[in-house]
Amino acid sequence: MGNEQCGRVTVKFLGYLSEVIGSRIEKEVCGEVELRNLIDEERIGTSLNDLVILVNGVAKGPETRVKPGDTITVMPHISGGA
């Protein structure tokens, strides 16, 4: 595994999550890592399964593997009334 690519993954938080964690963090990773290992659910106060997660603009789940250069956007579900 000595030839794994290392670099940064950018995680952007929207809505109330940006107030809890900040609007953006960067994590150093080598190779592919499971998204859920990059985000502290306790700090967010909810399960990643209850949030909308986009990886490079495409809806994904917390089990998705990400790699250096990927951009992750995490936001609460948006609901509205009539």
Image (spheres, rainbow, N blue to C red):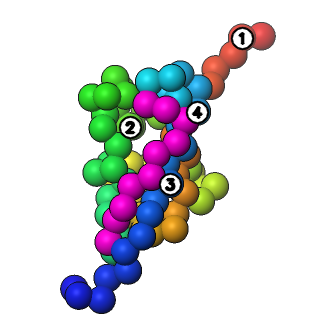
What is the quadrant of the N terminus in the image? Answer: bottom left
Does residue 75 appear to the left or right of 42 in the view shown?
right
Q: Is residue 75 visible?
A: no
Quarter-wise, where is residue 39 in the image?
Answer: top left
- In the rendered structure, are the residues bearing label 3 and label 2 in contact, judged by CB atoms less than 8 Å apart? no
**Residue highlighted by disc 4:** 14
Give above or below for 81 relative to 3: above
Identify which residue is drawn at 59% across, 26% down.
15
Q: Is residue 78 visible?
A: yes
**Residue highlighted by disc 2:** 48
Residue 53 position within the rendered picture, expressed as x and y whole percent measured from the top left = 51, 45
Counting other residues with Cα less than 10 Å from the Cα at mark 2, is it few (<14), some (14-19), or many (20 or more)? Answer: many
Q: CA distance from mark 1 to mark 3?
A: 33 Å
Give above or below for 12 relative to 31: above
Identify which residue is drawn at 38% across, 80% down.
5
**Residue highlighted by disc 3:** 10
Q: Nearer the viewer, mark 4 or mark 1?
A: 4
Pick the front one: 16 or 59: 16
Of the two numbered discs 4 and 1 on the same chain, state the one appearing first in sequence. Answer: 4
Pick the front one: 82 or 35: 35
Mark 2 residue element? helix
User: Disc 1 residue type?
Assistant: Gly
**Residue highlighted by disc 1:** 81
